[in-house]
Image (tube, rainbow, N blue to C red):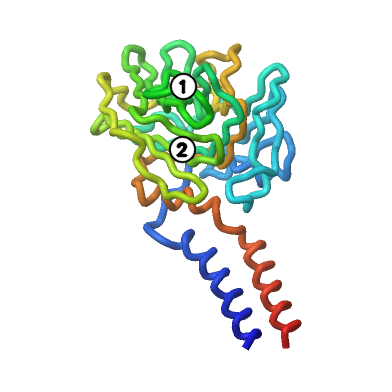
């Protein structure tokens, strides 16, 4: 009797863990993805997006951490220890230019936040402000600025000058513990939509979709470098979060709510090796109970 129960439990765990990643429609591949796992904790951050890949570098005190969403992935990036200020920087990720649709995603865990305009995901030129910058903003909609209360912002531009605009979430976000944050942009409607989920709650739209007053057209950062916690629009400023980020992605499409839920869930199920280990453990328990 106990043997049967353990077999069912093991199979159920495997089924539950494998189901979310397979659910829903087929996602497009991200143009860029930094999950901080593939480099084994080294200073180089492997780009797991589509070719051409643009690897990043942990700089200025940035270090890997084993504190990750759901505890299933190997590493996140810890930007808390500034030396002189922590960030991840790469070269010009040219495949992130000329995008008529855009989705930026990150997992975020904030230790402390009282002020500043922290750059979560950015590739923004310092001249015409072409490109994109997905930010934390300390001017809240309601209440005091804190890790569990801040606005989201995104700034977008072509690279011809004069076609630049930004939008703010009209509901505040929270990331005192691991939160999944995303923003989408579609030039055909000039609409920006913010999203939030977390380790236990699915992705929902954060506030009201915002229609830009100036349509930037195709977002293009020119030769600006891709960065987490730093941007070429303000390269000498400390604009990284006092906290951690994980699984940063850039898509060349405006993902749907269902798509973003798949992205969230992809960090909350064990890797194949972990699933195999769970199966082996279940088999071992079964043998011991016979």
Image quadrant assignment for residue 39: top right
Q: Which sits earlier in the primary sequence, circle 1 or circle 2?
A: 1
- Quarter holding the N terminus is bottom right
Q: Give the mark count.
A: 2
To which quarter of the image does residue 178 belong? Answer: top right
Considering only vertical position in the picture, is 273 above or below 90? Answer: below
Q: Quadrant of residue 87?
A: top right
* Foreground of the two, 38 or 174: 174
Point 26% across, 27% down: residue: 211
Q: Residues within 10 Å of mark 2 (few under 14, many from 20)?
A: many
| Nearest the eye: 18 or 44 | 18
The residue that label 1 is drawn on is 144
Residue ID at (72%, 88%): 290
Q: Secondary structure at mark 2?
A: strand
Q: Position of residue 101 (x, y in %)?
A: 35, 36
Taking the spot 42% from the left edge, 28% from the top edge, the residue there is: 152
Q: CA distance from mark 1 to mark 2?
A: 20 Å
Q: Position of residue 261 (x, y in %)?
A: 42, 50
Can residue 271 be seen here?
A: yes
Q: Percent x, y for residue 34?
A: 58, 40
Answer left or right for 248 relative to 100.
Answer: right
- Residue indicated by mark 2: 181
- Residue at 65 percent across and 85 percent down: it is 3
Q: Position of residue 108 (x, y in %)?
A: 54, 36
Left-right relation of 9 to 130: right
């Amino acid at each position: 009797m106990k043997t049967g129960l353990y077999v069912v439990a093991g199979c159920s765990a495997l089924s539950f863990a494998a189901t979310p990643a397979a659910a829903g429609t087929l996602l497009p591949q991200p143009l860029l993805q930094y999950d901080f796992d593939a480099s084994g904790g080294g200073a180089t951050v492997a780009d797991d997006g589509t070719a051409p890949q643009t690897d990043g570098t942990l700089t200025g005190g940035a270090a890997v951490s084993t504190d990750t969403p759901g505890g299933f992935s190997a590493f996140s990036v810890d930007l808390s220890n500034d030396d002189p200020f922590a960030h991840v920087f790469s070269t010009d990720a040219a495949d992130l230019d000329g995008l008529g649709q855009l989705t930026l995603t990150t997992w975020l865990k904030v230790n402390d936040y009282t002020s500043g305009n922290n750059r979560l995901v950015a590739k923004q030129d310092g001249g015409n402000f072409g490109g994109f910058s997905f930010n934390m903003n300390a001017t809240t909609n309601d209440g005091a600025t804190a890790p569990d209360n801040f606005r989201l912002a995104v700034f977008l531009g072509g690279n011809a000058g004069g076609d630049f605009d930004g939008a703010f979430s009209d509901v505040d976000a929270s990331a005192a513990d691991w939160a999944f944050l995303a923003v989408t942009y579609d030039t055909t409607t000039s609409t920006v939509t913010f999203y939030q989920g977390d380790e236990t709650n699915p992705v929902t739209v954060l506030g009201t979709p915002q229609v830009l007053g100036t349509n930037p057209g195709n977002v293009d950062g020119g030769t600006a470098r891709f960065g987490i916690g730093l941007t070429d629009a303000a390269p000498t400023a400390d604009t990284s979060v006092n906290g951690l980020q994980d699984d940063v992605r850039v898509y060349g499409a405006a993902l749907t709510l269902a798509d973003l839920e798949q992205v969230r869930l992809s960090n909350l199920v064990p890797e194949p090796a972990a699933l195999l280990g769970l199966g082996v453990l279940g088999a071992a328990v079964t043998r011991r109970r016979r």
